[in-house]
Amino acid sequence: VQRLIVFGASGYTGLELLRWLSLHPQARVVAASSDRWAGDPAFAHSATAPRGLIFVGHKEALARVEEGDIVLLATSAEVSLDLVPELLQKRSRVIDLSGAFRLASAEDFARWYGFAHKAPELLTEAAYGLPEISPPPPNARLVANPGCYATAAAIAVTPLVRRGLVEDGAPIVIDGKSGTTGAGRKSDEALSYSEVADTVRPYRLLSHQHTPEIERTVASAANKAVCVLFTPQLVPMRRGLLVTAYAPARQEVDAEAVARAFAEEYADARFVVIPKDRAPETGTVIHTNFCEVAARFDPRTRVITAIAALDNLVKGAAGQAIQNMNRMMGIDEATGLLAGGGGA
Amino acid sequence: VQRLIVFGASGYTGLELLRWLSLHPQARVVAASSDRWAGDPAFAHSATAPRGLIFVGHKEALARVEEGDIVLLATSAEVSLDLVPELLQKRSRVIDLSGAFRLASAEDFARWYGFAHKAPELLTEAAYGLPEISPPPPNARLVANPGCYATAAAIAVTPLVRRGLVEDGAPIVIDGKSGTTGAGRKSDEALSYSEVADTVRPYRLLSHQHTPEIERTVASAANKAVCVLFTPQLVPMRRGLLVTAYAPARQEVDAEAVARAFAEEYADARFVVIPKDRAPETGTVIHTNFCEVAARFDPRTRVITAIAALDNLVKGAAGQAIQNMNRMMGIDEATGLLAGGGGA
Amino acid sequence: VQRLIVFGASGYTGLELLRWLSLHPQARVVAASSDRWAGDPAFAHSATAPRGLIFVGHKEALARVEEGDIVLLATSAEVSLDLVPELLQKRSRVIDLSGAFRLASAEDFARWYGFAHKAPELLTEAAYGLPEISPPPPNARLVANPGCYATAAAIAVTPLVRRGLVEDGAPIVIDGKSGTTGAGRKSDEALSYSEVADTVRPYRLLSHQHTPEIERTVASAANKAVCVLFTPQLVPMRRGLLVTAYAPARQEVDAEAVARAFAEEYADARFVVIPKDRAPETGTVIHTNFCEVAARFDPRTRVITAIAALDNLVKGAAGQAIQNMNRMMGIDEATGLLAGGGGA
Amino acid sequence: VQRLIVFGASGYTGLELLRWLSLHPQARVVAASSDRWAGDPAFAHSATAPRGLIFVGHKEALARVEEGDIVLLATSAEVSLDLVPELLQKRSRVIDLSGAFRLASAEDFARWYGFAHKAPELLTEAAYGLPEISPPPPNARLVANPGCYATAAAIAVTPLVRRGLVEDGAPIVIDGKSGTTGAGRKSDEALSYSEVADTVRPYRLLSHQHTPEIERTVASAANKAVCVLFTPQLVPMRRGLLVTAYAPARQEVDAEAVARAFAEEYADARFVVIPKDRAPETGTVIHTNFCEVAARFDPRTRVITAIAALDNLVKGAAGQAIQNMNRMMGIDEATGLLAGGGGA
């Protein structure tokens, strides 16, 4: 049984990790850190947490890390940057759910995240783990777990770019809508129920840090430069995320080519579903690790619309981290992820 | 035209005051304070604010108060306690929407609000202004505007107690459900969308400060001691409040007596509606100054259920303040309150 | 491995059954009926349904029933009444999630459900299966699975009545709040998003069919007559249910006796949780089989307030049915119910 | 005082019309039809309806129409098609809030609405009334009131096209998000709270009937062909609508040109607001006739993002109809529309 350590276990993503990991037959959480609630039973703060687990402080969790452990970081980018070098030195393997290792260069972090990257030498080593698009190598020491929007966007757009269906050089527009847990667990008047209910609210126009992540992921997968405009929007729901991507089609493209691209690219993808007779929507995938995706070609405008929906806390965070973990463990990537959320 | 000054104009209640006051034909807001946004056009923070109005700071608003002004305080109890003595000294008349003058004695404030009252000598002077139950005298200098829960509870329960339908000495149980704007505009993790959506959450069990306010109001109106257990509960909606009150009936009571009590007590009440063929609910009264109320007698248990629903920001705060203001001005109490929210 | 047949598998309760049963290590769904979607993969209608399962029609499901099967009915009371006699004749064992077998007599059904009961001879045989209060006997052929409100109400009230803390003969008031999935999956303008959002709506005043179910359950458990007034209210959320029960205390009762009653009664209950430092709320238990419960004694009014919260589709329906099934199978009642929703 | 007749007064748009018209100083509703609730006081079905008004049946309303009346149709396109010729024959003037007269030709209706237009001869006469873009002539007999999405889209996109900021021939992508009242008041499982909460749901991909309406409006205003791809999406809220439009910029365009386009085009628009320091959002404009709009130029991708937010029932329907009515009456277009929803 694989030993696991979870840092940041009392945030929304951390608790979701605990929930799903409790279903995993071949891995076991040996420490879960929460500086906020260190000493408390996890169960006291979430009915879905495993009953026996007691939160420990960050320091205590770090002290428990052993060689060969897999460490899951559900921490902020700043905290991850501090922890990762030390964890690698302890010869543990790390899956970082923050954005700290998702981009290619320190310059990109300076521009999009606004901080000076402390461990730029690890950026080449870090494997970006989006199993359906860029599966991490089984022996990866450090996996950068993708952002929630970036996961949906890459799943929606990659088949089109990889198969050359998009007009060369044309920017791809990605319109994202997300529930509130994507913003984390915190006190913020702008995230209060009174301010969020009844509202659709665009934010971080032109500057969201998932923009370069999407470009890099799709470009790597398709071996072709990609230019993305990404607009995130907050909608009044707790979970769930939907992206609607728009790409101008190359001249010879038709509806059949678009449909075939998705059918073929995802024929073997365990967690990608192309719904019949309806568009993807978030309501049907929340609380599961599935991503619904579909695309339509419009002959009037010659624009391809590709839509992807997922649960930001599962396929967009904790579930995907477990998929990556399974690959690092050399076992079936769906282990522990089908039961209770799209059963066996 | 009556001059008005509004303090605390950028909170939810303050903005609601501005909205309704813009409909009032005989009163005009000459200053609206917001320390937070002093200098900004009110309109920049709320599309429903009057276009020409610029927020001023508290000090500036205070400087503008003249003899004969009516001053509306949408401030915290602490701020109201500081302001009221000074405002009365300036010979303005005050409607305080906070709880600072709603109870009978300094001891009650110490027990239920947890503070030492700074102006206990004003407590006897303060008129509790719930127009349907205890209308303020036309010449009142200081009106304590009722709490939102207390308004609904008093409207639901008073007819029963006043007419002797409730078993003597029996406690009356009041189960309240409120939307989030009742908690005010603030940063608080517990009020974030992620924590409030999908939740019914009881709070301040046995200790909510509206408890003594309800008891005092009903007891004064009925001239009879009343004992209330009040349980507030947060539900996932922005506006609206419903109380379900339960009272054991005296022996001779029947369904007809209960129905008649409400029909008669509220025959002339402009803002109380007894719905036909359905129970009161919040959805039909939000954004209006109406309170829906109805009661049912259960012959099996001999318990009377009385239900009242209203908009916590209108009949539970700003609208009721305007009703009181109209009475202080000696004009029709419905002035400015019917248009656009239950029109003429 | 126990063979299972599920009828009515495409409603909210049916789909929840499929989800949880996919986690069960010792039971397997061999047929799941949906007349509406017969022939479709269950997965096409719910991402949480097991991938291989195809819905069959009711007739086909019936044909597949074999001696020794456990049949779970997530059907309407009318359909259950038709099916149960035939299923028992086939020597299968039945867990009925409808109300068809929850009351004591045909007269009760006529009064509270408004229909003439077709199989009154089975009413004495039917075991009411609320494991924490009235566990079904291991050899039961027919288990009536409790209503969602009735489950929460019985868990909240039984300890008080059983220990004689409630004033003799006094009615117990139960104020319930439920999300919309409790009303089932259907077209109904009154249940549309536009009519439910922003609303708290009392319904079926004095006449809800869970009233006699609560009375019967508590009375049987406490061996004492009980009189209940129950008021259900719809609140804007999909899942979750909270009841606030109010009972006048007997003279010698104090806060300590109330706290002890719950601590002792539920010391061994696997799915009942008494939260520390806060009241029960729905947000922390949805998607789990746990019920949060707590009570407070108010010395001012001498009323006991007991609050219980649960997920109407899990502990209030599908999860509880699986608890009962586990008892009928003679295995640990928590089997398959802790993982993923309050893990091992 | 202008006489008004409202058909379809008990739907969401009809009730919103009644609410706002009760604020209008120079017009009076003399009949309001609702076949469903004929004979009932409007107030019984909506606390915001004027107190004295009784719904009449469609026939009765028709009988009351006199020469010179303004008739507002909040009916389905089918009903409007039946009524309009008869109303014009009675020499009343009509504002049709349905889609029945919004497109240019019978062919367009066949293609996008799926019906054979019964009165194609009126299509040239019908004036499309979007005051900020295409104000109806003061003497119009028949005004087609715009669709809610089309209003927001035209306000977002027209300045860009009119000023030649968009690349010639490039399709403009419009991503729309709307609350549920846009779908009307009806029984529909897909619109039930249980199915809508927690969901973002794209619908009518490539085929929504507002597509040609947007193209026609912008093209007429800019005198230039326009090609639009429109994707509507349902989000969990009752009111409010936001469109995010994406257009590739012509080569010489920069951020300043984009900002200036909006500032200048809407300098005199009473109901268009360009928010400072934040993007448009729905929460700040619901319950008002204001439309928030703003645009950003992205130098990386050279795409212009233009965002508009409004209340689908006010600026997207009833409020805009009153703006058009005011113009037909030759009075200030804002009459009755500022009070109570962005006061005087």
Image: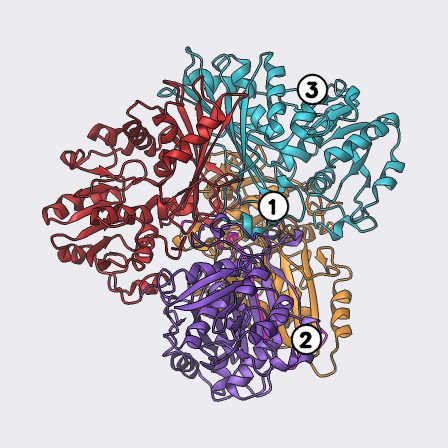
Chain colours: A orange, B red, C cyan, D purple
From the top left corner, tell me how far across and down residue A85 is, in percent.
Answer: 51, 55
Position of D199 compared to B193: left or right? right
Q: Which residue is mark 2?
A: D117
- Identify the secondary structure beneath mark 2: loop
- Identify the secondary structure beneath mark 1: loop
Q: Residue at x 56, y 75 (%)?
A: D88
In this view of the protein, can residue A105 be seen by the observer?
no
Please tell me the numbered disc located at residue C104: 3
The answer to which image quadrant residue C159 occupies is top right
Disc 1 to disc 2, C-alpha distance: 70 Å
Residue C205, placed above or below residue D344: above
Q: Residues within 10 Å of mark 2 (few under 14, many from 20)?
A: many
Please tell me the numbered disc located at residue A139: none
Asked whether A306 or B256 is in front, the reply is B256
From the top left corner, tell me how far across and down residue B238 is, in percent.
Answer: 44, 49
- Identify the secondary structure beneath mark 3: loop
Position of D246 compared to C122: left or right? left
**Badge 3 and badge 2 both on one subunit:** no
Q: Give the extent of the magenta segment.
A: A162-187
Q: Residues within 10 Å of mark 3 (few under 14, many from 20)?
A: some
Q: Quadrant of the C terminus of chain D?
A: bottom left
Please tell me whether residue A177 belongs to the stretch shown in magenta. Answer: yes
Q: Which residue is mark 1?
A: A69
Disc 3 to disc 2, C-alpha distance: 62 Å
Please state which amino acid type lies under the numbered disc 1: Asp
Q: Quadrant of the N terminus of chain D?
A: bottom left
Q: Residue at x 75, y 74 (%)?
A: A255
Please state which amino acid type lies under the numbered disc 3: Ala
Residue A88, placed above or below residue A124: above
> Contact, CB < 8 Å: mark 3 with mark 2?
no
Asked whether B250 or B22 is in front, the reply is B250
- Indicate which label's residue lies in the foreground, 1 or 3: 3
